[in-house]
Image: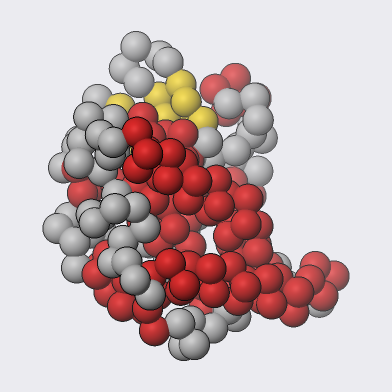
Amino acid sequence: MITIYGMRTSGNCYKLQLLLDQLGRHYRWVDVDSAHGGTRTPDYLTKNPNGKVPLLELADGRRLAESNAILCYLAEGTEFWPADSWQRAQTLQWLFFEQYSHEPCIAVARFIHRWLPQDHPRRAELPTLRQRGMQVLAVMELHLTDNDWFVGDRYGIADVALYAYTHCAGEGGVDLQPFPHIRRWLARVRGRPGHTAMQN
């Protein structure tokens, strides 16, 4: 049995729930409210000194942080992780894109818009974050113009990672309407066996 420490409304945590449910694996979920200091307690910091979720804990006590590293570990030996070395490199390319280009604008816009009060000074960042989000989505839209999935001809963890925050981009005011290929891809992901929705 594996344990996931996570916050269910977090896209980074949702990635793991989605993959595990699609793999049909049993796991234990421990809710950690990172928005209200749950990752900064002494007990949690002994598990992950970086003070973030998600965190994977194996039965033997080993722990792994960083959502996309956990995806790679969980997908090893399954259809979600390509056997071909070039496709594995492409998968990593999209995972890095998700964390360094996509998440810093789309996920952050969602956080500010959804959780911070109307008078919070960080709300001034929203126009820039939304503009950057549209640029990131344009990169994805271009790829999906000629591809059903992000790597090769099958669904994999690159799709899982990018789906997590893309499908709820509207919660941060990032409009998906101009991206028909992305919207069709989102529908394909929702139609996959074992798909479960993010809890809000």
Residue at 40%, 14% in the rendered image: 61
Residue at 42%, 30% in the rendered image: 56
Residue at 45%, 82% in the rendered image: 179
Nearer to us in this view, 55 or 95? 95
Percent of width and height locating residue 71: 38, 39
The N terminus: image quadrant: top left
Q: Residue furthest right?
A: 121
Q: Is residue 34 above or below residue 48?
A: below
Percent of width and height locating residue 41: 64, 31
Q: Residue furthest top?
A: 60
Q: Is residue 142 above or below residue 23?
A: below
How many circles with numbers are drawn on the protein? Answer: 0
Q: Is residue 64 above or below residue 52?
A: above
Residue at 46%, 74% in the rendered image: 141
The C terminus: image quadrant: bottom left
In this rendering, position of residue 45 left or right of residue 197:
right
Q: Is residue 187 visible?
A: yes
Q: Is residue 186 visible?
A: no
Nearer to us in this view, 190 or 117? 190
Percent of width and height locating residue 90: 42, 45
Nearer to us in this view, 128 or 92? 92
Nearer to us in this view, 170 or 142? 142
